[in-house]
Image (cartoon, rainbow, N blue to C red):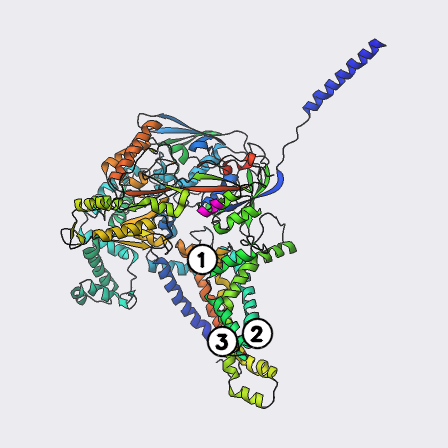
Amino acid sequence: MKKNLKMLLAMLLALVMIVSVFAGCKKTEKAKPDDKVMVIAVEANFEEKWNPFMAESAYDMQVMEQIFVAPMKGVEGNALENWGGSITAGEVQADGSMTYTVTANKGMKFTDGEPITIDDYIYALYVTADPSYTGPAQLVAEDIKGVKEYYYDDSNYTANNAAAEAEAEKYTLANISEEDYVAYLVATNLEGWWDGDPAGLVAEDYTWSNYIEDEGFGDKLAEIDATNPDEMLALLALIEYTNYGDSYDPYSYYSEKVYKDIKDADPSSTPVDEIAGIVRVDDYTCTVTYNSVNIYGDRSINQYFMPEHYYGEIVKGSVGDILANVEPLGSGPYIWGGYDAGIVTVTANQDYFEGVPKTGTIRWLYVPPTDALTALMNGDVDIAVIGGEPEYVEEMDAAQDIIRYDLTDNAGYGYVGLNCENLKLGVRKGLFSLMNREPSVTAYYETLATVIERPSTTVIAEYPQDAGTYYEYSPEKALEYFESAGYKQVDGKLVDASGNQLVVNAYVGGSGIGDHPSFTMLMQAAEDMKNLGGEMQVQDVDFNVLQAAMNDGTADMFCLAWGDVNTCDKQSQFHSEGGQNRYRISDPTMDTLLEQILQTVDLEERSALYAEMLDLAMELAIEIPVYQRCNIIAYNRSAINLDTVMQATTFYDYADELWTVQMN
Amino acid sequence: MRQFIIRRLLISIIVLLGVSMMLYALVRSMPSDYVTLATATNPKVTPEMKEELRKIYGLDKSIPEGYVNWLGSAVKGEFGVSLKFNRPVTQIISEYAPITFTVAFIALVLELLIAIPLGILAARKQYTKTDYIITTLVFIGISMPTFFFAALLKKWFGPAGLNWFPAYGLLQARVIYNGFSFAKLLDYAQHLVLPISMWVVTGVGSMLRYTRTNMLEVLNADYIRTARAKGVSEHNVVYSHGFRNTLITLVTLLGSSLPGLFSGAAITEGLFALEGLGNIALTASHQADVPYLMGFNMLLAVLTIIGYLISDILYAAVDPRVRLS
């Protein structure tokens, strides 16, 4: 009996074990997102460019980032780590070229079920390299092998462009002949100014004939038929050449024309259908070759996997339909749900390759900055970026049981740019010495911004944190600098050798009421200038007026800020050929340093070069460094499970891991 | 009548042509063009790339050449793609016109409902306490800066105060509506109370003063005195004899309100985060978005012309002395 019982027990145990084993084999229940709705406030209206090729505003991008996946993603400390694939830099070759290997993870799918391959990545590169592409991610700006040949559809682009540049030298302002200059003005209708009507008006009650007479060409006007458009245009072109020769840009016109002529005359130039530097290796791998080392190449080519089957095939020179598709479809943690009544909706992608998102629905809407904090406290929104107003911080400090907020340094900085063509070096240094930055910035931002000592955001690793003040605020020192530039005080006025008073203008976008962190500083400088015998005209204007004055060179000083800075690449700004060289600075040492920085892989070495370059920028007095400000991200404690939200830093916040953020 | 309308329509074509020329020249003469503004903060954009973009957008052409191109497309009903929003101009306008129109139309009806009775009352009680109170309130409404009044409304009635009405947007983001429902309509209505109130308070004054002034003029006319002498009741004197004549001028005012129903109010829309045509037009102006500004302003020009045409026709309808020929 006892033996039977033991056997029965043994059999029972064996049965339990077998059942347990089968139970273990049972298909595991897939995690599901909750059915809650998370509401996130954004600071400005969406531009509604729901297409990652076209999205430009930070708010449109914020939505796209949840719908699409790229090979790499940004993580803590401004670093990149593998995400939907990888981008690996190869060795620098003897010819200076460098190849990146890009991979796509196997097994990833778009939300319509189509598998992702490397072709979807290459597709994105080709769209952004297309000559008809109008979005912000212009691949032609990269030094990728064959990309310019593809863009300009010229197999001999490098040689033809070099020949054109050499030929166009004779059309620079210093070299151009009167005949060529006048021909350019006629061909461009005075850069679009001439309306073709000799009887037309230049301004109210002011005809072209009035203008010609006022410019001192009344006698010439009497010699021509003033009703003949061609004769009038020819005379006006002569006037503009004679009186305003420095204000036009014949070089750009001719360099383009010369290049086109050379290309058309080159029998060996053939159309280009492929980018030589982009090579497909297999279904999940491709390589991208740069002609020269670019330490930020991996960031530049880190584009989303874009479904060609959904966005449509590329027809070179005609990608408009691809760019016009505003119903995004990707492979990210969330699926596009639509935009209605100012609200964007996305829903969890349960097949997201990293896991199932925790929150079922995310919605973004624009909340005016003045209402954002109230909306957050009331629970109308769960997460919001709060404007950098000191009183908001006080309110949040008083409501810490309701709100948690993170302060992060903004990836950018505020500056005052100087036009180096209008202002001599001594004058620029003098102006630097008149800027009393600390009180101005503190009055505006209180503790939410700090004065910076070099023209760079302080959040990048290369920034010299120990840099001291280069130009102390000192009107006496400023006077010395002005005197070194040839000015001296005569009868209470600061004049040059010809007796001309020192007059400088400064453009600031303060909404007409001085609402700008640099405004107080400029007003004080204007007062100091007056006391020294000079004059500073502070122009508080609309942004596009400031832009126009800066671009056409009439602005001597302009207050602006750089944003979205995550690299130490200052080439476009301070290089003599930089696309955003609004300072008109041209210094060979600076050019060399800027180029060296981008080719120096070692961080320590690069930081030293960067510090040297910034010191030189201060010595050349290009950009007055003003402030580094903070951003504030705030969360409603009762709505968001804050254990699932990391402490935000400049380059890494909740949005980077939104799919893991849970609601209470 | 038909001859009058045909003649007016023909003249309108010439007027529109002139308006479009002026508009195009003005928009293209803005201090900076779209490419300059859109690429201002992008450090990687080169001058060559900007030139290419100008070619794509047609901004490389002179003003006359660009205008001819625009006109060629416009007569075919193609107003191009907005540079800022990357969508067809007609699509943007048709998408946002309903909300702009709804807000403006409701506000206009409310303004009329308030302005006419109070205008008549103020005229009837000229130089009395009632008149002074109404006139003072009207001046406060007219003089109050919109941004200040919006802040007051939000503070008193929004979530920061009594929490009767939402202070921004069109719908609650927390609730997802499937299709159209009464609850959704109610949500819309709640969100529009404050913006419409602001619109009415700041806009009712001019219409009220118009009514009052015209009523005063009419009530002092000889035929009113005659009517009173005949023993007609005061109610009939005011509403049958007086107000009917005031209506003539009000009708012309209403006709000219037509473009206002679609032009939106950039500041009001901006303050209450309503994405309407006024707010979009303001953004487009800041970015020198030529196609959108042309399309939108031409719509307003057409509506202005239609509005005045309707005014003239209504004028003839309400005033038998007027003959359209």
State which tag comes first along the sequence, 1 or 3.
1
Residue A512 quadrant: bottom left
Q: Position of residue A289 (x, y in %)?
A: 37, 31
| Residue A508 sits inside the magenta stretch | no
Q: Is label 2 or label 1 in front?
A: 2
State which tag comes first along the sequence, 2 or 1.
2
Q: Chain of mark 3?
A: B
Q: Chain of mark 1?
A: B
Q: Chain of mark 2?
A: B
Residue span colored magenta: A389-394
Q: Position of residue B265 (x, y in %)?
A: 48, 61
- Badge 3 amino acid: Asp
| Residue A391 sits inside the magenta stretch | yes
Q: What is the distance, in whole Å, between disc 2 and disc 3 at their CAs?
A: 25 Å
Q: Dot 1 corresponds to which residue?
A: B281
Q: Position of residue B249 (x, y in %)?
A: 50, 77
- Badge 2 amino acid: Pro
Disc 2 secondary structure class: helix
Q: What is the distance, in whole Å, between disc 1 and disc 3 at their CAs?
A: 29 Å
State which tag comes first along the sequence, 2 or 3.
2
Q: Nearer the viewer, residue A399 or A333?
A: A399
- Badge 1 amino acid: Ala
Q: Dot 2 corresponds to which residue?
A: B117
Residue A59 at least partly seen: no
